[in-house]
Amino acid sequence: MSFKAALITLSLLGSADVAQALQPTSTRPLPQSTNTGRLQSQVNPEDPYGRARCGFDEKHVIVYESTQGAQASDCNWSSTNPDQVYAPTFIYSIPVVVHVIQHTNGDGALSPATIQDQIDVLNEDFRAAQGSPGAPGLYTMIQFHLATVDPDGAPTTGITYSTNDAWHNDEWTTPGYWEVLQWDPERYLNIYTLNTVGYYGYYWGSPGSIEDGVYLWWRYVGNNSSPTAENDNYGRTATHEIGHYLGLHHTFEGGCSGGSCYGTGDLICDTNPHSSATWGCPSSESSCGSQVPVRNYMNYTDDNCMWEFTEEQARRMRCRIQWYRSNLADTEPGCGFAGAYCKSAPNSVGTGALIGHAGSFSVTTNDVELNVSGAVPGQFGIFYFGPNQISTPFGHGVRCVGGETRRLPVLQADFIGDAALTLDFTTAPASDITADSTWNFQFWYRDPAAAGATFNLSNGLELTFCP
Ligand SMILES: [Zn+2]
Protein backbone atom coordinates (compact mmCIF):
# COMPACT_ATOMS: atom_id res chain seq x y z
CA MET A 1 0.00 0.00 0.00
CA SER A 2 1.39 3.37 -0.94
CA PHE A 3 1.82 5.96 1.74
CA LYS A 4 -0.95 8.06 0.26
CA ALA A 5 -3.32 5.10 0.21
CA ALA A 6 -2.31 4.32 3.76
CA LEU A 7 -3.09 7.85 4.76
CA ILE A 8 -6.52 7.77 3.17
CA THR A 9 -7.19 4.58 5.06
CA LEU A 10 -5.93 6.11 8.25
CA SER A 11 -8.09 9.14 7.85
CA LEU A 12 -11.11 6.86 8.06
CA LEU A 13 -9.97 5.34 11.31
CA GLY A 14 -10.07 6.58 14.86
CA SER A 15 -6.85 7.67 16.46
CA ALA A 16 -6.49 4.46 18.46
CA ASP A 17 -6.77 2.54 15.22
CA VAL A 18 -4.19 4.82 13.70
CA ALA A 19 -1.80 3.98 16.49
CA GLN A 20 -2.50 0.30 15.93
CA ALA A 21 -2.12 0.46 12.18
CA LEU A 22 1.15 2.30 12.34
CA GLN A 23 2.54 0.21 15.22
CA PRO A 24 6.17 1.09 14.80
CA THR A 25 9.30 -0.07 16.44
CA SER A 26 10.78 2.81 18.32
CA THR A 27 10.32 6.50 17.68
CA ARG A 28 7.34 7.93 15.89
CA PRO A 29 7.19 6.82 12.30
CA LEU A 30 5.13 9.13 10.12
CA PRO A 31 7.81 8.88 7.46
CA GLN A 32 6.75 11.61 5.11
CA SER A 33 4.28 14.36 4.69
CA THR A 34 1.16 14.49 2.59
CA ASN A 35 2.48 17.58 0.89
CA THR A 36 4.51 16.38 -2.03
CA GLY A 37 7.67 18.17 -2.98
CA ARG A 38 8.56 19.24 0.53
CA LEU A 39 12.16 19.64 1.36
CA GLN A 40 13.30 17.22 3.99
CA SER A 41 14.66 18.69 7.19
CA GLN A 42 18.39 18.77 7.30
CA VAL A 43 20.65 18.28 10.24
CA ASN A 44 21.95 21.57 11.53
CA PRO A 45 25.63 21.50 10.56
CA GLU A 46 26.49 23.64 13.57
CA ASP A 47 24.50 21.70 16.13
CA PRO A 48 26.64 19.82 18.63
CA TYR A 49 23.92 17.20 18.94
CA GLY A 50 23.60 16.61 15.21
CA ARG A 51 19.89 17.25 15.24
CA ALA A 52 17.61 18.71 12.61
CA ARG A 53 16.11 22.03 13.53
CA CYS A 54 12.57 20.97 12.88
CA GLY A 55 10.69 17.75 12.22
CA PHE A 56 7.63 19.43 10.75
CA ASP A 57 8.23 18.23 7.21
CA GLU A 58 8.59 14.59 8.24
CA LYS A 59 6.22 14.46 11.17
CA HIS A 60 3.34 16.60 10.11
CA VAL A 61 0.52 14.53 8.72
CA ILE A 62 -2.81 16.09 8.03
CA VAL A 63 -5.02 13.48 9.63
CA TYR A 64 -8.11 15.58 9.09
CA GLU A 65 -9.01 19.19 9.25
CA SER A 66 -12.25 20.25 10.80
CA THR A 67 -13.09 23.80 9.94
CA GLN A 68 -15.81 26.11 11.07
CA GLY A 69 -16.35 28.38 8.13
CA ALA A 70 -16.55 28.78 4.41
CA GLN A 71 -13.55 31.10 4.47
CA ALA A 72 -11.31 28.29 5.66
CA SER A 73 -9.97 28.21 2.11
CA ASP A 74 -8.35 31.57 2.89
CA CYS A 75 -5.69 29.66 4.82
CA ASN A 76 -5.84 25.96 3.97
CA TRP A 77 -2.70 24.01 3.13
CA SER A 78 -2.77 25.01 -0.53
CA SER A 79 -3.35 28.76 -0.51
CA THR A 80 -3.49 31.99 1.45
CA ASN A 81 -5.78 34.99 1.12
CA PRO A 82 -4.03 37.72 3.11
CA ASP A 83 -7.14 39.89 3.26
CA GLN A 84 -7.22 42.98 5.44
CA VAL A 85 -9.90 41.28 7.55
CA TYR A 86 -7.12 39.11 9.02
CA ALA A 87 -4.86 42.05 9.93
CA PRO A 88 -3.96 42.31 13.63
CA THR A 89 -6.63 44.59 15.07
CA PHE A 90 -7.49 42.72 18.25
CA ILE A 91 -5.71 40.30 20.53
CA TYR A 92 -5.96 36.52 20.43
CA SER A 93 -4.90 35.16 23.82
CA ILE A 94 -4.10 31.45 23.69
CA PRO A 95 -4.16 29.23 26.80
CA VAL A 96 -1.24 26.81 26.92
CA VAL A 97 -0.72 23.56 28.79
CA VAL A 98 2.86 22.30 28.95
CA HIS A 99 3.32 18.56 29.52
CA VAL A 100 6.79 18.02 30.99
CA ILE A 101 7.85 14.40 30.38
CA GLN A 102 10.88 13.43 32.44
CA HIS A 103 13.27 10.46 32.30
CA THR A 104 14.07 8.55 35.48
CA ASN A 105 17.70 9.61 35.01
CA GLY A 106 16.65 13.22 35.55
CA ASP A 107 16.68 14.31 31.92
CA GLY A 108 13.78 16.54 30.98
CA ALA A 109 13.26 18.06 34.42
CA LEU A 110 12.07 21.60 33.79
CA SER A 111 11.01 23.94 36.57
CA PRO A 112 7.85 26.02 36.46
CA ALA A 113 10.15 29.05 36.20
CA THR A 114 11.70 27.68 33.01
CA ILE A 115 8.27 26.99 31.55
CA GLN A 116 7.16 30.53 32.35
CA ASP A 117 10.39 31.76 30.80
CA GLN A 118 9.41 29.99 27.58
CA ILE A 119 5.96 31.57 27.63
CA ASP A 120 7.64 34.96 28.10
CA VAL A 121 9.82 34.35 25.02
CA LEU A 122 6.74 33.51 22.97
CA ASN A 123 5.10 36.75 24.00
CA GLU A 124 8.23 38.76 23.32
CA ASP A 125 8.38 37.29 19.82
CA PHE A 126 4.72 37.31 18.83
CA ARG A 127 4.23 40.76 20.37
CA ALA A 128 7.58 42.21 19.27
CA ALA A 129 7.91 43.41 22.85
CA GLN A 130 9.96 46.54 23.43
CA GLY A 131 13.40 45.83 24.82
CA SER A 132 13.26 42.11 23.98
CA PRO A 133 15.15 40.20 21.26
CA GLY A 134 11.87 40.08 19.30
CA ALA A 135 11.48 43.87 19.34
CA PRO A 136 12.36 44.53 15.66
CA GLY A 137 9.57 42.19 14.57
CA LEU A 138 5.83 42.51 14.02
CA TYR A 139 3.16 42.84 16.69
CA THR A 140 0.94 39.93 15.60
CA MET A 141 -1.56 40.54 18.41
CA ILE A 142 -1.31 36.84 19.27
CA GLN A 143 -0.25 36.09 22.83
CA PHE A 144 0.09 33.09 25.13
CA HIS A 145 -0.52 32.31 28.79
CA LEU A 146 -0.33 29.18 30.89
CA ALA A 147 -3.84 27.83 31.39
CA THR A 148 -5.39 28.76 34.72
CA VAL A 149 -8.37 26.41 34.43
CA ASP A 150 -8.09 22.76 33.42
CA PRO A 151 -10.56 20.92 31.13
CA ASP A 152 -12.70 20.02 34.17
CA GLY A 153 -12.88 23.61 35.34
CA ALA A 154 -10.44 23.20 38.22
CA PRO A 155 -7.63 25.68 38.91
CA THR A 156 -4.29 24.66 37.37
CA THR A 157 -0.74 25.88 36.89
CA GLY A 158 -0.99 24.95 33.20
CA ILE A 159 1.89 22.46 33.63
CA THR A 160 1.67 18.67 33.97
CA TYR A 161 4.58 16.48 35.09
CA SER A 162 5.12 12.83 34.10
CA THR A 163 8.08 10.51 34.49
CA ASN A 164 8.22 7.76 31.88
CA ASP A 165 11.38 6.69 30.03
CA ALA A 166 9.61 5.48 26.88
CA TRP A 167 7.52 8.62 26.69
CA HIS A 168 10.54 10.79 27.36
CA ASN A 169 12.34 9.19 24.42
CA ASP A 170 9.31 9.79 22.20
CA GLU A 171 8.72 6.10 21.70
CA TRP A 172 5.49 4.89 20.20
CA THR A 173 3.50 3.32 22.99
CA THR A 174 -0.11 2.21 23.00
CA PRO A 175 -1.74 4.40 23.93
CA GLY A 176 0.69 7.15 23.02
CA TYR A 177 1.61 9.67 25.67
CA TRP A 178 -0.12 12.35 23.61
CA GLU A 179 -3.34 10.37 23.90
CA VAL A 180 -2.95 10.07 27.66
CA LEU A 181 -1.80 13.59 28.42
CA GLN A 182 -3.52 15.80 25.89
CA TRP A 183 -6.01 18.39 27.04
CA ASP A 184 -8.88 19.30 24.69
CA PRO A 185 -6.88 20.48 21.67
CA GLU A 186 -9.70 22.74 20.55
CA ARG A 187 -9.37 24.76 23.76
CA TYR A 188 -5.68 24.50 24.65
CA LEU A 189 -2.34 24.63 22.88
CA ASN A 190 -0.68 21.42 24.08
CA ILE A 191 3.10 21.62 24.32
CA TYR A 192 5.11 18.48 25.18
CA THR A 193 8.71 18.75 26.39
CA LEU A 194 10.77 15.57 26.01
CA ASN A 195 13.58 14.06 23.96
CA THR A 196 12.28 14.69 20.46
CA VAL A 197 14.77 12.27 18.96
CA GLY A 198 16.54 13.74 15.95
CA TYR A 199 14.93 17.16 16.18
CA TYR A 200 14.83 20.36 18.17
CA GLY A 201 11.08 20.11 17.90
CA TYR A 202 8.14 19.53 15.64
CA TYR A 203 4.46 20.16 15.18
CA TRP A 204 2.28 17.13 14.61
CA GLY A 205 -1.37 16.54 13.76
CA SER A 206 -4.16 18.79 12.63
CA PRO A 207 -6.33 21.25 14.54
CA GLY A 208 -8.40 19.28 17.04
CA SER A 209 -6.74 15.91 16.38
CA ILE A 210 -5.44 13.64 19.12
CA GLU A 211 -1.88 14.41 18.04
CA ASP A 212 -2.45 18.15 17.79
CA GLY A 213 0.37 19.85 19.62
CA VAL A 214 3.90 21.17 19.67
CA TYR A 215 6.70 18.81 20.68
CA LEU A 216 9.93 20.37 21.98
CA TRP A 217 13.31 18.97 22.89
CA TRP A 218 13.52 19.76 26.57
CA ARG A 219 17.08 21.16 26.34
CA TYR A 220 15.90 23.99 24.09
CA VAL A 221 12.98 25.10 26.24
CA GLY A 222 13.14 28.56 27.76
CA ASN A 223 15.76 31.22 27.34
CA ASN A 224 19.37 30.14 27.97
CA SER A 225 18.00 27.11 29.73
CA SER A 226 20.89 24.84 28.78
CA PRO A 227 24.58 25.70 29.01
CA THR A 228 25.27 23.41 26.03
CA ALA A 229 22.57 24.79 23.79
CA GLU A 230 24.84 27.39 22.19
CA ASN A 231 23.14 29.55 19.60
CA ASP A 232 19.79 27.85 19.81
CA ASN A 233 18.97 28.24 23.47
CA TYR A 234 16.87 31.37 23.27
CA GLY A 235 13.50 29.64 23.22
CA ARG A 236 12.86 30.18 19.52
CA THR A 237 12.30 26.49 18.78
CA ALA A 238 8.88 27.02 20.36
CA THR A 239 8.28 30.21 18.39
CA HIS A 240 9.09 28.37 15.14
CA GLU A 241 6.98 25.29 15.93
CA ILE A 242 4.01 27.38 17.02
CA GLY A 243 4.35 29.11 13.66
CA HIS A 244 3.66 25.67 12.12
CA TYR A 245 0.90 25.03 14.65
CA LEU A 246 -0.75 28.23 13.40
CA GLY A 247 -0.44 27.19 9.77
CA LEU A 248 2.93 28.47 8.54
CA HIS A 249 5.34 26.59 6.29
CA HIS A 250 9.09 27.09 6.23
CA THR A 251 10.07 30.13 4.18
CA PHE A 252 12.12 27.77 1.97
CA GLU A 253 9.16 25.46 1.34
CA GLY A 254 9.11 24.54 -2.34
CA GLY A 255 12.49 26.15 -3.03
CA CYS A 256 12.50 28.61 -5.94
CA SER A 257 9.06 27.51 -7.09
CA GLY A 258 7.40 29.75 -9.62
CA GLY A 259 3.73 30.59 -9.84
CA SER A 260 1.54 32.57 -7.52
CA CYS A 261 3.28 33.15 -4.22
CA TYR A 262 -0.08 32.69 -2.45
CA GLY A 263 -0.45 29.22 -3.96
CA THR A 264 3.07 27.82 -4.05
CA GLY A 265 6.05 27.57 -1.71
CA ASP A 266 5.16 28.83 1.75
CA LEU A 267 1.90 30.33 0.39
CA ILE A 268 3.05 33.79 1.46
CA CYS A 269 4.18 36.63 -0.82
CA ASP A 270 6.08 38.89 1.57
CA THR A 271 8.61 36.17 2.40
CA ASN A 272 10.94 35.76 -0.57
CA PRO A 273 11.41 32.17 -1.75
CA HIS A 274 14.79 30.54 -1.26
CA SER A 275 16.26 27.28 -2.44
CA SER A 276 17.19 25.84 0.95
CA ALA A 277 17.33 26.57 4.66
CA THR A 278 19.67 29.24 6.00
CA TRP A 279 22.04 28.19 8.79
CA GLY A 280 23.99 30.25 11.29
CA CYS A 281 23.39 33.96 11.05
CA PRO A 282 24.50 35.54 7.77
CA SER A 283 23.95 39.29 7.58
CA SER A 284 22.30 38.72 4.22
CA GLU A 285 21.94 36.02 1.63
CA SER A 286 20.42 35.88 -1.82
CA SER A 287 18.64 33.01 -3.49
CA CYS A 288 16.10 32.60 -6.27
CA GLY A 289 17.03 36.12 -7.44
CA SER A 290 16.04 37.90 -4.24
CA GLN A 291 17.06 38.43 -0.62
CA VAL A 292 16.50 35.49 1.70
CA PRO A 293 14.33 36.22 4.76
CA VAL A 294 17.25 35.50 7.06
CA ARG A 295 15.55 36.91 10.17
CA ASN A 296 12.30 35.05 9.73
CA TYR A 297 11.22 32.70 12.51
CA MET A 298 10.22 30.16 9.86
CA ASN A 299 13.74 29.89 8.44
CA TYR A 300 16.48 27.80 10.13
CA THR A 301 18.89 30.47 11.33
CA ASP A 302 20.18 30.54 14.89
CA ASP A 303 17.84 31.51 17.69
CA ASN A 304 19.75 34.70 18.31
CA CYS A 305 19.44 35.65 14.64
CA MET A 306 15.69 35.59 14.14
CA TRP A 307 13.04 38.13 15.06
CA GLU A 308 10.52 38.31 12.25
CA PHE A 309 7.03 37.25 11.34
CA THR A 310 5.83 39.20 8.31
CA GLU A 311 2.48 40.94 7.98
CA GLU A 312 1.17 38.18 5.71
CA GLN A 313 2.42 35.43 8.01
CA ALA A 314 0.56 37.16 10.84
CA ARG A 315 -2.60 37.32 8.74
CA ARG A 316 -2.32 33.65 7.79
CA MET A 317 -1.87 32.66 11.45
CA ARG A 318 -4.86 34.77 12.49
CA CYS A 319 -6.93 33.26 9.67
CA ARG A 320 -6.02 29.79 10.97
CA ILE A 321 -7.13 30.75 14.47
CA GLN A 322 -10.40 32.14 13.14
CA TRP A 323 -11.35 29.23 10.88
CA TYR A 324 -9.45 26.20 12.19
CA ARG A 325 -9.05 26.92 15.91
CA SER A 326 -12.14 28.96 16.65
CA ASN A 327 -12.54 27.70 20.24
CA LEU A 328 -8.91 28.17 21.18
CA ALA A 329 -8.27 31.81 21.90
CA ASP A 330 -9.95 34.48 23.96
CA THR A 331 -10.23 37.75 22.13
CA GLU A 332 -9.53 41.09 23.69
CA PRO A 333 -9.84 44.58 22.29
CA GLY A 334 -6.59 45.60 20.76
CA CYS A 335 -4.44 48.30 22.18
CA GLY A 336 -5.32 51.73 20.89
CA PHE A 337 -9.02 51.31 21.65
CA ALA A 338 -10.77 54.36 23.11
CA GLY A 339 -14.44 54.49 23.90
CA ALA A 340 -16.63 57.00 25.73
CA TYR A 341 -19.36 55.52 27.89
CA CYS A 342 -21.67 56.45 30.76
CA LYS A 343 -23.22 59.93 31.12
CA SER A 344 -22.15 63.46 31.75
CA ALA A 345 -24.64 65.53 33.79
CA PRO A 346 -25.40 69.29 33.48
CA ASN A 347 -23.53 71.54 35.92
CA SER A 348 -23.88 75.14 37.12
CA VAL A 349 -22.18 76.51 34.00
CA GLY A 350 -23.45 74.33 31.17
CA THR A 351 -24.37 70.97 29.77
CA GLY A 352 -21.66 69.06 31.60
CA ALA A 353 -18.02 68.02 31.43
CA LEU A 354 -16.68 65.65 28.77
CA ILE A 355 -13.53 63.58 29.13
CA GLY A 356 -11.12 63.02 26.23
CA HIS A 357 -7.59 61.91 25.48
CA ALA A 358 -4.58 62.87 23.34
CA GLY A 359 -1.12 61.54 22.54
CA SER A 360 -0.35 57.91 21.83
CA PHE A 361 -1.61 54.87 23.69
CA SER A 362 1.92 53.65 24.40
CA VAL A 363 3.15 53.03 27.92
CA THR A 364 6.69 53.08 26.53
CA THR A 365 6.28 56.45 24.85
CA ASN A 366 4.67 57.70 28.06
CA ASP A 367 2.74 60.57 26.45
CA VAL A 368 -0.91 59.66 27.06
CA GLU A 369 -2.89 62.75 27.98
CA LEU A 370 -6.28 62.90 29.67
CA ASN A 371 -8.29 66.06 29.18
CA VAL A 372 -11.66 67.42 30.14
CA SER A 373 -13.76 70.31 28.87
CA GLY A 374 -16.91 71.89 30.26
CA ALA A 375 -15.97 71.67 33.95
CA VAL A 376 -16.42 74.69 36.24
CA PRO A 377 -13.79 77.40 35.56
CA GLY A 378 -11.24 77.85 38.34
CA GLN A 379 -12.50 74.88 40.35
CA PHE A 380 -10.46 71.91 41.48
CA GLY A 381 -10.94 68.37 40.31
CA ILE A 382 -9.21 65.03 39.78
CA PHE A 383 -9.02 62.33 37.14
CA TYR A 384 -9.37 58.88 38.62
CA PHE A 385 -9.43 55.40 37.08
CA GLY A 386 -10.32 51.81 37.81
CA PRO A 387 -11.02 48.41 36.30
CA ASN A 388 -14.83 48.37 36.13
CA GLN A 389 -17.57 50.27 34.37
CA ILE A 390 -20.54 51.24 36.51
CA SER A 391 -23.33 53.80 36.31
CA THR A 392 -24.43 55.07 39.74
CA PRO A 393 -25.90 58.49 40.70
CA PHE A 394 -23.27 60.42 42.64
CA GLY A 395 -23.40 64.11 43.61
CA HIS A 396 -24.93 65.97 40.70
CA GLY A 397 -23.63 63.44 38.23
CA VAL A 398 -23.12 59.76 37.59
CA ARG A 399 -20.23 57.70 38.84
CA CYS A 400 -18.87 55.65 35.90
CA VAL A 401 -15.79 53.88 37.34
CA GLY A 402 -15.92 51.01 39.80
CA GLY A 403 -13.67 48.43 41.38
CA GLU A 404 -10.45 49.48 43.07
CA THR A 405 -10.03 53.06 41.92
CA ARG A 406 -6.86 55.17 41.74
CA ARG A 407 -6.75 58.95 42.10
CA LEU A 408 -4.48 61.10 39.99
CA PRO A 409 -3.10 64.48 41.17
CA VAL A 410 -5.46 67.41 41.87
CA LEU A 411 -5.91 69.85 38.99
CA GLN A 412 -7.51 73.26 38.64
CA ALA A 413 -9.76 73.92 35.65
CA ASP A 414 -8.69 76.95 33.60
CA PHE A 415 -10.86 80.01 32.89
CA ILE A 416 -12.99 78.15 30.34
CA GLY A 417 -13.35 75.01 32.40
CA ASP A 418 -10.67 72.84 30.68
CA ALA A 419 -8.03 70.74 32.41
CA ALA A 420 -5.45 68.21 31.22
CA LEU A 421 -2.99 65.75 32.71
CA THR A 422 -0.26 63.65 31.10
CA LEU A 423 -0.14 60.19 32.65
CA ASP A 424 3.26 59.12 33.94
CA PHE A 425 3.47 55.35 33.72
CA THR A 426 6.70 55.32 35.71
CA THR A 427 5.01 56.59 38.88
CA ALA A 428 2.12 55.31 40.97
CA PRO A 429 -0.77 55.13 40.44
CA ALA A 430 -0.40 55.21 36.63
CA SER A 431 2.37 52.60 36.93
CA ASP A 432 -0.46 50.09 37.48
CA ILE A 433 -1.26 50.54 33.79
CA THR A 434 0.54 48.01 31.59
CA ALA A 435 0.56 47.29 27.86
CA ASP A 436 -2.67 45.73 26.59
CA SER A 437 -4.52 46.49 29.80
CA THR A 438 -7.85 48.27 29.72
CA TRP A 439 -8.87 50.95 32.24
CA ASN A 440 -11.78 53.31 32.75
CA PHE A 441 -11.30 57.02 33.50
CA GLN A 442 -13.49 59.83 34.77
CA PHE A 443 -13.09 63.43 35.98
CA TRP A 444 -14.55 64.44 39.35
CA TYR A 445 -14.79 68.19 39.97
CA ARG A 446 -16.10 70.71 42.45
CA ASP A 447 -19.22 72.73 41.59
CA PRO A 448 -19.99 74.87 44.68
CA ALA A 449 -22.62 76.98 42.89
CA ALA A 450 -24.87 73.97 42.40
CA ALA A 451 -27.36 73.46 45.17
CA GLY A 452 -27.03 70.48 47.47
CA ALA A 453 -24.04 68.32 46.55
CA THR A 454 -21.13 70.52 45.56
CA PHE A 455 -19.53 68.23 43.02
CA ASN A 456 -20.17 66.66 39.64
CA LEU A 457 -18.51 64.24 37.21
CA SER A 458 -17.69 63.93 33.54
CA ASN A 459 -18.71 60.96 31.42
CA GLY A 460 -16.46 57.85 31.36
CA LEU A 461 -13.63 56.92 29.01
CA GLU A 462 -12.32 53.42 28.36
CA LEU A 463 -8.75 53.14 27.10
CA THR A 464 -6.69 50.07 26.12
CA PHE A 465 -2.98 50.75 26.27
CA CYS A 466 -0.19 49.64 23.94
CA PRO A 467 3.34 48.32 24.52
ZN1 LIG B 1 9.90 23.95 11.01
Image (cartoon, rainbow, N blue to C red):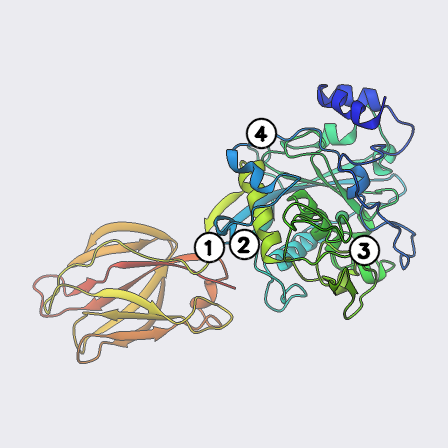
User: Residue 334 — which label?
Assistant: 1
Relative to the observer, which residue lies in front, 115 or 367? Answer: 367
**Which tag is nearer the camera, tag 3 or tag 4?**
3
Sequence-first disc among 1 and 2: 2
Do the CB atoms of the residues marked 3 and 2 lie less than 8 Å apart? no
Q: Which amino acid, mark 4?
A: Asp
Sequence-first disc among 3 and 4: 4
Q: Which residue is mark 2?
A: 141
User: Residue 172 — which label?
Assistant: none
Sequence-first disc among 1 and 4: 4
Q: In the displayed orientation, state which residue is furthest to the bottom.
A: 415
Marks 1 and 2, how far apart in space? 8 Å
Q: Is residue 467 left or right of residue 377?
A: right
Q: Which residue is mark 4?
A: 152
Q: Which amino acid, mark 3?
A: Ala
Tag 4 secondary structure? loop
Q: Which amino acid, mark 2?
A: Met
The image shows residue 352, relative to residue 102, as above or below, that is below
Marks 2 and 4, how far apart in space? 28 Å
- Residue at position x 27%, y 65% in the image: 355
Q: Is residue 74 left or right of residue 54?
A: left
Do the CB atoms of the residues marked 1 and 2 lie less than 8 Å apart? yes
Q: Is residue 271 left or right of residue 441?
A: right
Do the CB atoms of the residues marked 3 and 4 lie less than 8 Å apart? no
User: Residue 277 — which label?
Assistant: 3
Q: Which amino acid, mark 1?
A: Gly
